[in-house]
Image: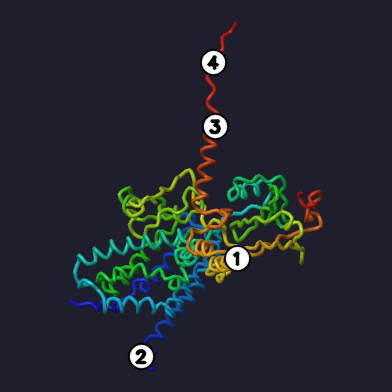
């Protein structure tokens, strides 16, 4: 057992020390507040951000979530979904018809994105900013 | 002097851990006081560092298999006697290990099976020293360590290779920063630098699948994968489809889950092979984008924009009548 201890103990010490160091570095990163500045989303910004990932698709309508942290844009039969993650953005696309039928729970549209790397987008919705927007409730023909 | 050819006398990476901690704190503090370009989002930082810690733990748990295989091959099959005390042996291992790293890294980007193990390192939308520690949990399982076995077979002792691999990993740590813009031209010409590696971490079509170097950038120049950082187009970091949250399990396993999902829907051996070993983004009907198609579309857009760019109107002098 002594042989095992000479291997295990230094490893445990190293991992324990590393865990403390991780906590310290994350704490300092939180204290520093040096994330990228992110302005509330508006239709123009949403179009600009979506154009980076979908340069060949031009949205005709852009809906902004109630908390301005997400958007859904219609481009033909596609719904382009944009949402904020920390100080960055995530985009995905899905069929527009499916986006229209997405359920609303606890004040959030729940969009199933069918992608293991981003399975779900939750966008805030309110009475003054309903989903789907007026005039866009019907699926595209 | 003799050195144990089997067990490395020290672990370069373990020795460097205090350096990692101090320099990350330094980069954050310099960024905080506007003395260096650095952005940190604390949840992103936590994810990167948890991936680094997890990678160490996974390495301790299952890394023994790769090491045992290398030792077995060395003891039973090595072709040449290469002494660890010879200077030329260290020069040779420096270049050969670095070229091996280049090909390992290139495979890790261009073939999905190995991309699944490597993608986590690129999944942060930030580029800072913490990102450097966003290391794989599944590299051992993906078997990329096999690429180093020929060096063992030639006769480079496993301990020597372990030390050189550690030196390479530590070298690549400091280049994960936006704080250093450009280094002297001679250095940029031969060595991997923050500028070259920013290109490697960028998701702009212009920069995809470029600059695979470990220590020396000469391999990219030799094998046609070098792309210089363009001041007019700053890198956007991350992956083509950025991750939807900061969950470390998703960071570690999302591409493997994607492969499993695709394999479950496969209808032929060709599809199975394509999903496993095709380039990331491969699909039977070509409906998804690979780096190649993204670059081609970008080039087509660039060409179209150039074609429609209005030419300067000819200046016609106004003549008073």
Label 3 or label 4, whichever comes before in sequence order: 3
Residue at horizontal 56 percent and vertical 61 percent from the top: A33
> Are marks 1 and 3 in one subunit?
yes
Give how far apart the Cα atoms at labels 2 and 3 are.
73 Å
Number of the front mark, 1 or 3:
1
Q: Is residue B161 above or below residue A126?
A: below
Picture quadrant where residue B101 is located: bottom left
Q: Which residue is mark 3?
A: B309
Pointer 2 indicates a residue of which chain?
Answer: A
Residue placed most toward the observer, A125 or B225? B225
Residue A64: x %, y % from top left: 72, 52
> Are marks 4 and 2 in one subunit?
no
Give how far apart the Cα atoms at labels 3 and 4 are.
21 Å
Q: Which residue is mark 1?
A: B265
Q: Which residue is mark 2?
A: A3
Residue B133: x %, y % from top left: 45, 67
Assess disc 4: are there few (<14), some (14-19) or many (≥20) residues with their C-alpha within 10 Å of its C-alpha.
few
> Are marks 2 and 3 in one subunit?
no
Pointer 4 indicates a residue of which chain?
Answer: B
Number of the front mark, 1 or 2:
1
Picture quadrant where residue B5 is located: bottom left
Q: Which residue is mark 4?
A: B316
């Amino acid at each position: 057992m002594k042989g095992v201890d000479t291997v295990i103990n230094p490893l445990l010490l190293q991992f324990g020390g590393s865990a403390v160091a991780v906590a310290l570095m994350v704490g300092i990163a939180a204290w520093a507040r040096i994330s990228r500045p992110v302005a509330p989303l508006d239709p123009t910004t949403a179009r600009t951000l979506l154009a980076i990932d979908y340069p060949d698709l031009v949205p005709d309508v852009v809906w902004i979530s109630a908390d301005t942290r997400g958007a859904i844009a219609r481009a033909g039969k596609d719904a382009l979904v944009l949402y904020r993650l920390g100080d960055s953005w995530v985009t995905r696309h899905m069929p527009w018809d499916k986006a229209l039928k997405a359920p609303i729970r606890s004040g959030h549209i729940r969009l199933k994105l069918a992608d293991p790397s981003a399975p779900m987008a939750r966008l805030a919705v309110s009475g003054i900013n309903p989903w789907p927007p007026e005039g866009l409730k019907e699926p595209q023909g | 002097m003799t050195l144990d050819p089997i067990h490395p006398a020290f672990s370069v990476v373990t020795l460097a851990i205090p350096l990692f901690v101090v320099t990350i704190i330094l980069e954050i503090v310099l960024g905080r006081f506007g003395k260096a370009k650095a952005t940190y989002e604390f949840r992103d930082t936590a994810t990167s560092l948890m991936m680094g810690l997890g990678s160490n733990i996974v390495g301790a748990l299952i890394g023994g298999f790769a090491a045992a295989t290398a030792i077995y091959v060395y003891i039973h099959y090595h072709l040449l006697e290469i002494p660890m005390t010879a200077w030329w042996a260290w020069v040779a291992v420096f270049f050969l290990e670095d070229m091996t790293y280049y090909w390992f890294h290139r495979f890790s980007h261009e073939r999905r099976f190995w991309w699944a193990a490597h993608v986590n390192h690129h999944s942060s939308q930030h580029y800072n020293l913490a990102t450097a520690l966003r290391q794989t949990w599944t590299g051992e399982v993906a078997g990329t360590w096999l690429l180093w076995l020929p060096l063992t077979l030639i006769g480079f002792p496993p301990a020597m290779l372990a030390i050189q691999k550690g030196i390479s990993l530590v070298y690549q740590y400091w280049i994960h920063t936006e704080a250093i813009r450009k280094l002297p031209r001679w250095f940029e010409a031969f060595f991997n630098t923050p500028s070259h590696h920013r290109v490697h971490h960028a998701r702009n079509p212009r920069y995809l699948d470029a600059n695979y170097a470990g220590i020396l950038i000469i391999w990219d120049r030799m094998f046609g994968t070098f792309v210089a950082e363009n001041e007019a187009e700053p890198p956007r970091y991350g992956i083509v489809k950025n991750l939807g949250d900061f969950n470390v399990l998703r960071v570690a396993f999302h591409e493997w889950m994607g492969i499993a999902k695709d394999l479950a829907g496969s209808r032929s051996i060709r599809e199975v092979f394509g999903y496993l070993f095709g380039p990331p983004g491969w699909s039977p009907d070509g409906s998804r984008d690979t780096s190649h198609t993204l670059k081609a579309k970008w080039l087509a857009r660039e060409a179209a924009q150039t074609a429609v760019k209005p030419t300067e109107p000819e200046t016609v002098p106004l003549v008073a009548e």
